[in-house]
Amino acid sequence: MAAELLQKTLKSFPSVTDGVTRLAYVKRLRSYKPSLYFAKPQGLGPECVARWGYSCTGVDEISCSECGAKVCVRVDDTLGKEEGGKVVDALKRKLREEHEEFCTYRWNPAPETYLTYPPTNATWGEIEGRCQALDSVFGEGVKVDCGDEVEGSVGAWKGYNEGVVGAACCNWRVDSEEEGRLYCDCCGATAPEKEETTFERANKLRRMLNGVG
């Protein structure tokens, strides 16, 4: 009865990952690296387990960011289909059951809509808008690390070069408050200034030698 009451109470509040706290979900996702968490069965991938409040803290190890619950997500690849399936099902149940009784994520994981990213016209329109802004300020000078998953998988699009398109697809935007900077409004990351030309570097050195900022 107490558990049911707690569940109803928590569900009466906005999800812990709605609105601004969606950033927490994205932050958890960024903790999953191929060297630590790789080739998991369906339903146990980073985007799924992060819904339940887990960040990757070691090889095949995940930990709840709120209550500290730990789960080892490892399936012996020598198991047969039936036995392996039972292990996977047990691990899926653990995603909820390992949480402390009063942990928010036990009863209120991030919504499943976070697992989708449909290529709607609005989405492509937003990407094109970011491309336009990035190209107008940086052009060929866009220099951000989009990760191995993106590098080489995007090319020129609608007249914008590969660097601009890759940065736009990874949600990088032009920082209107600080010239020459990029930022991500999803996770808050920032990127360095555009690559300077030889002429710009020479001018900066001249100003420094002359005592000008």
Image (spheres, grey):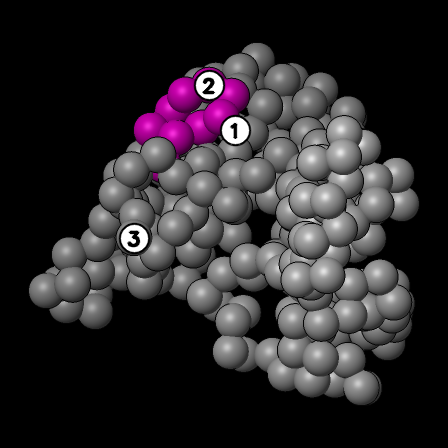
Q: Is residue 67 above or below residue 155?
A: above
Q: Position of residue 136 (x, y in %)?
A: 87, 67
Q: Position of residue 138 (x, y in %)?
A: 78, 63
Q: Which is more foreground, mark 2 or mark 3?
A: 3
**How far apart, in angstroms, are the residues tagged by discs 2 and 3?**
25 Å
Pointer 1 and pointer 3: residues touching (CB < 8 Å)?
no
Q: Residues within 10 Å of mark 2 (few under 14, many from 20)?
A: some
Q: Check disc 1 and give the amino acid type.
A: Arg
Instruction: Give left or right: position of 198 versus 124.
Output: left
Give the SS element for disc 1.
helix
Q: Which mark is residue 35?
A: 3
Q: Which mark is residue 161?
A: none
Q: Residues within 10 Å of mark 3 (few under 14, many from 20)?
A: few
Magenta span of residues = 62-70
Which residue is drawn at the image coordinates 46% and 35% (left, top)? 54
**How far apart, in angstroms, are the residues tagged by discs 1 and 3?**
28 Å
Residue located beneath label 1 in the image: 106
Q: Which is more foreground, mark 1 or mark 2?
A: 2
Which residue is drawn at the image coordinates 51% and 78% (left, top)? 152
Quadrant where the N terminus sits is top right
Q: Is residue 213 above or below residue 167?
A: above
Dot 1 or dot 3, earlier in sequence? 3
Dot 2 or dot 3, earlier in sequence? 3
Depth order, front residue of 115/122: 122
Which residue is drawn at the image coordinates 52% and 39% (left, top)? 28
Give the SS element for disc 3.
loop
Q: Check disc 2 and give the amino acid type.
A: Cys
